[in-house]
Amino acid sequence: MNRTLARSLPVAAIGVAILLPMFMGDYPLQVARNIMLYMALAVTWDMLLRSGQISFGIAGLFGLGSYASILAVVRGGMPGWLSIPFAGLFAGLAAFLIGFLILRLRHTYFSIVTLALGEIFRIIIHNMHDFSGGPEGIVVQQGIIFGGASRNLYWLTLAGLAVALLASYWFEKSKVRFALTAIRNNEISAKSSGVNIFRWLLLAFVVTSAIQGMMGGIFVMSYGFASPETVFSADFTLLPLAMALLGGIHSTVGPILGGLLLGLVSEWLKLQIPYGHLVVYGVMIVVVILFMPQGLLGLARKTMRAAGRNRK
Amino acid sequence: MTKLKTIGLSRRFLGLVAVNKVSFSMDEGEILGIIGPNGAGKTTFINLISGIIMPGEGKIEYKGQDITYMPAHERARLGIARTYQLIHPLENLSLIENVMVGSIFARGHSMREARRRAADLCGELGLKDLDRDTSKLTILEVKKMEIARALANEPEVLFLDEVMAGLNADETKDLIATVQRIARERKLAVGVVEHVMGVIRELTHRVIVLEAGELIAEGPYEEVSKNPRVVEAYLGGAA
Ligand SMILES: Nc1ncnc2c1ncn2[C@@H]1O[C@H](COP(=O)(O)OP(=O)(O)OP(=O)(O)O)[C@@H](O)[C@H]1O
Ligand SMILES: [Mg+2]
């Protein structure tokens, strides 16, 4: 019975997610879009974490994809819809090149460099005035994709989330899981078992960066606007991280669960205390790391195991 | 036939020469003991051969091919496997998944094929209940898993770094028989590091003795154990 439930739950969730716009007004749809955007970022952050690498560069790649998309449209005349996969490709290619430099680094060094990377992208965009629009940002003159119809924008973001989920599922079900887990647990053992560590890290870094860039494309195409302060905002790094930690790391379900909860809570908080939501994320990260490092999923597993034991 | 050969292999750590101009060779089907007091350089020697660290000088040849500076994962694919003195189970993978890793990445088998082969290997080593967490295994089971993981590479040369350490007499006997059978059936060249001389006497065809990184003696155990330099190295180490 448990198994049929486990099978039907995702199907039901997908059904609800697709049909939601039929029953919702513009404001809730926009909230839902936001949450899905963060979920996708949270899942991709977790995918790289499965190899043991902690990235603080989500906002960097998200912002890079955002600008790749909007500049392709505004300066290159690319159709809006096409600029979204283009943003993914661009961020993926950038990650591929950067990967050769930074994927030899580990631990804090890797994390700090990914953080710096975002900062570098932001400063470059900031200073390329004539091309990028500089600090004031840049607007899509041709009008927003889908004429800004909120249902369509919702479905577009949902499609982005679906890409992230499919990639995460692939990471979980294929030999990618073996490679990344082996690397995370013990690189020396992994090498001795024939794992080409650099190659698998590069794969994880490129795939997750491409999806983060693509989400950036979806974001700017939905609003028709990008500025360094909005698309490179620390929110895009901290929130996904807090969501994944809260839900439970090293899984697909965890970041989704955490994203749903934290997304709803933060939306509510934003209305109560402006900027209060940021404090909540900070506190959340600390509390989760200190008291439930396995997140809600881990807590659920523990409770189920305890319940199972009591029944016996 | 010579499988593996080193010529003047050396490695220092800062001022310390951990392995000093060691030349040796290993033949197909041969079980070679590698002995010496604590800190003699045995583990470092295996690390050099398996590519975990790189040598300062000298040469390593595997089946006639120069592999001196080849990355570790490529050596694993070529057919060199090892276990670790300080065991490194992959704790987020189950018992059978630990064994599958070598099959997937060193051999390129599909996941299904890797699972089948891993199950066979575990069966051969007497491991049961293959979906367990590695934290649930006994010491003997962990040691067997380490051997199974190395064998999953389908190696031609295998190094066992103190796999018998921590086992009781019965378990040791069991594992000696297992290693002998595996080596015979696969025509493996096996390098065995052990501190218990009974194990070395029973298991090996030939031994090399390291002391302070240098190879000081070589030959059948019975012969080498009477060699005055070897006796002194051990007494000196014990005193
Ligand atoms: N990574 C390293 N950095 C610095 N020194 C090292 C390193 N690895 C080994 N050594 C030193 O090299 C020497 C040889 O060590 P090694 O572990 O190879 O000895 P061993 O023969 O395996 O000893 P044991 O029987 O205790 O396992 C020791 O003095 C050790 O401290
Ligand atoms: Mg040792």
Image (spheres, coloured by chain):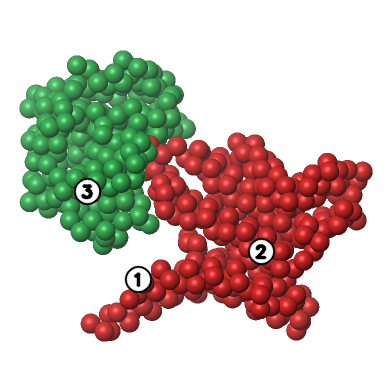
Chain colours: A red, B green
* Residue B104, image quadrant: top left
Q: Is residue A264 visible?
A: yes
Please tell me which residue lies in front, A286 or A34: A34
Viewer-nearest of labels 1 and 2? 2
Q: Which label sits on residue A3? A: 1
Please tell me which residue lies in front, A164 or A254: A164
Say what secondary structure mark 2 lies in.
helix
Q: Relative to B26, say whether A233 is above or below.
A: below
Residue at image mark 2: A155
Say what secondary structure mark 1 lies in.
helix
Q: Relative to A267, say whether B185 is above or below.
A: above
Q: Are marks 1 and 2 on the same chain?
A: yes
The reply, left or right, for residue B181 in relation to residue A187 is left
Determine the chain carrying the residue at label 2: A
Quarter holding the N terminus of chain A is bottom left
The reply, left or right, for residue A217 in relation to residue A75 is left
Q: Is residue A230 visible?
A: no
Quarter holding the C terminus of chain A is bottom left
Measuring 28% from the left and 84% from the top, which residue is drawn there?
A310
